[in-house]
Amino acid sequence: MQTVRQPPSPRSPYRSWWAGTGGTPPPTVDVPAVGKQVVGLLRDQWNTSDALREYGITVDDGMTLINTDLNKYDGLATVRTRKGTQKFLSVTVWADPTGAMFYQMDPTSASNLIDAANKEKEPQG
């Protein structure tokens, strides 16, 4: 599926750039593929890292990524604790049309997830 882009409005600062390209839109990032790649990397990190695997966190398929800057995407992954409690993990992804990318878990979001997993491990009483 190819994305069709409309030329910028006449008042847009990108109008002169667009005209200089002969109307060819810039290459785009395959956002669904990047999301799948990040999900796989998150799963690997939560399952194999000595510091994280004890929490029993699983990452669901699919990830919502929203373009927030040129090559920056803010994302939300659905994750589950060992007892199946659904939580969300915020990530930031930088990606370009060549397929190069890297991601970073939001420290506060990851910490909240670990806290929830730890509370489920504690004896109820």
Image (cartoon, rainbow, N blue to C red):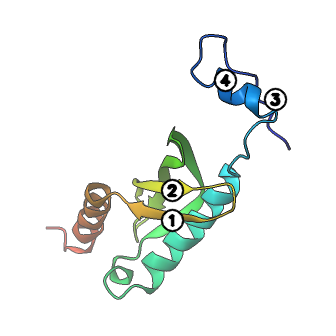
In the figure, 46 relative to 73: above or below? below
Amino acid found under the numbered disc labelled 4: Ser
Observer-nearest of 33 and 120: 33
Q: Residues within 10 Å of mark 2 (few under 14, many from 20)?
A: some
Amino acid found under the numbered disc labelled 1: Phe
Locate the N terminus and report the quarter of the image it occupies: top right
Q: Are marks 4 and 1 in contact (CB under 8 Å)?
A: no
Occupied quadrant, residue 10: top right
The Cα atoms of the two marked residues, 4 and 2, are separated by 26 Å
Look at mark 4 in the image and give the residue it sits on.
16
Q: Going by the image, does 14 lie left or right of 47?
A: right
Q: Going by the image, does 109 lie left or right of 77?
A: left
Q: Residues within 10 Å of mark 3 (few under 14, many from 20)?
A: few
Dot 2 falls on a residue whose secondary structure is: strand
Dot 3 falls on a residue whose secondary structure is: loop
The Cα atoms of the two marked residues, 2 and 1, are separated by 6 Å
Could you tell which of marks 4 and 3 lies nearer the N-terminus? Answer: 4
Look at mark 2 in the image and give the residue it sits on.
94
Dot 4 falls on a residue whose secondary structure is: helix
Q: Are marks 4 and 3 in contact (CB under 8 Å)?
A: no
Look at mark 1 in the image and give the residue it sits on.
102
Question: Which mark is in front, 3 or 1?
Answer: 3
Q: Are marks 2 and 1 in contact (CB under 8 Å)?
A: yes
Q: Are marks 3 and 1 in contact (CB under 8 Å)?
A: no
Question: Which mark is in front, 4 or 2?
Answer: 4
Question: Which mark is in front, 4 or 3?
Answer: 4
